Amino acid sequence: MKIVIIGAEAAGMSAAAKARRAAPDAEIDVYEMSRVISFGACGLPYFVGGEFDNPDYMAELSVEDFARRDIRVHTGHQALSLDPVAKRVQVRDLASGEIHVAAYDKLMIATGASELRPPLPGLTLGNVFTLRTMADGLALREAARNPAVRNVAIIGAGFIGLELAEAMVKLGKQVRLIQLADRVMPDAFDPEITSLMEDELRLHGVAVHLSESVGALQGKHAVERVVTQRGEYDCELAVLCVGVRPNTAFLDDTGIQRLANGAIVVNAYGETSLPDVYAAGDCATAPHQLTGQPTYAPLATTANKLGRLVGENMAGGRQAYPGTLASAAVRVLGLEAGRAGLGEAQARAAGFDCRTVMVKDKNHTNYVPGQTEIHVKLVYEADSLRLLGAQMIGKSGAVHRIDALAVAIASGLSARELGMLDFCYAPPFSRTWDVMNVAGNVAK
């Protein structure tokens, strides 16, 4: 059996490793456009902010590591086209320019996604960055350490934008966060949660600009200011964090099913609409566990899990992915926030008759030092009280509680059952009735 994988990051290499274990005699070739493999981009904001100094921590395994497993990884190779009838992929060696054809019995597409670069004047100025690759991280970290850089403009307030805002605050910069939408992280968290994030950003001196559109970046050689419909703001460094686009343009002539943003639609087995072609990672959707619909959730956890199943299925297995809950977390300076399942607007758009409850409580008992507020929002079906989604934010203990709520949602528990779940109690960790119990009992 000849297995070909396009892309050597989380999904692709998880698939390669699993396929090798499941099919010891298979030929496995992996083609990767960059020179870095098994790369975890999630660590980039923390590397830029100086929370660790060795960039190799973000690239877990090397080409040589996989060669010892008889997996051939070809770096510096770009996929140009796919012929699904002849079962061949055309690939270019970026160093030599040579083009060759890779034949396959099973193909996996794991080409990831690229940062969006809107057509703004001034994008080619110095000190204008995106943050997606190892090279991006190395360059941004070096530029941010220049003492001449005092004012930083971050354009976009999603996960990377907020994580970079925190990093730049810790580096002593004056940070301006400019967001086109009317709140931060609108696709991940509900307004009750994001309003607390915005308060925390402002508390730490971040200038938060909402419902503001960037029209241009200006400067002589390097960026000197950012221009919006409301004004001009000085900056010596700017970072674009406005979203990502799946790297699937090379599939335009194949007829493969994709979403409007280019993400490849896959079923629970990682199969695309083309025979013997699979996909996973930031280039692909994943079925949502609650709606069954293809969902674009470019998360490392989803990429690794679905990638592992694709590896097994390409080797002859038939393992189904239970579906994503898009569980995710973010640290915003002194706060941590997590979410799982559907937000309120998402649940209503999916056709659920739902209700919500928002509870504010404390993270542990009042006689143990460090007690702080913790907030939880539940989304649940009106009749059955079945949990559909949960979001939580606080200074301590919010994110790991979301893990428990993700299990509750995946298990189909009701708010009433959540109210009586037997969570751990000890004064340093919780109250006798944990905030999750309280929220479940309040839900009606």
Image (cartoon, grey):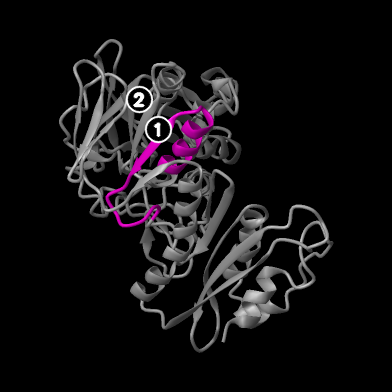
Which circle marks residue 33 in the picture? 2
Q: Residue at x 53, y 61 (%)?
A: 340
Answer whether residue 310 is visible to the viewer in this image.
Answer: no
How crowded pointer 1 is (Cα within 10 Å; few <14, some 14-19, many 20+) is rated as many
Please provide percent x and percent y for residue 284: 36, 48
Return the residue found at the far bottom.
Answer: 383
Task: Looking at the picture, tell me which residue is in the foreground, 336 or 288.
Answer: 336
Identify the amino acid type marked 2. Met
Confirm whether the magenta stretch covers residue 161.
Answer: yes
145 sits to left or right of 423:
left
Between 371 and 157, the residue placed more toward the observer is 371
Q: Amino acid at mark 1?
A: Gly
| Residue 44 image position (x, y, % from top left) | 48, 31
Write down the region rendered in magenta.
Answer: 160-185
Residue at label 1?
7
- 37 relative to 191, above or below: above
Element type where label 2 sits in the image: loop
**Residue sitting at x 36%, y 56%:** 183
Q: Is residue 196 visible?
A: yes
Q: Is residue 250 above or below residue 47?
A: below
Residue farthest top in this picture:
96
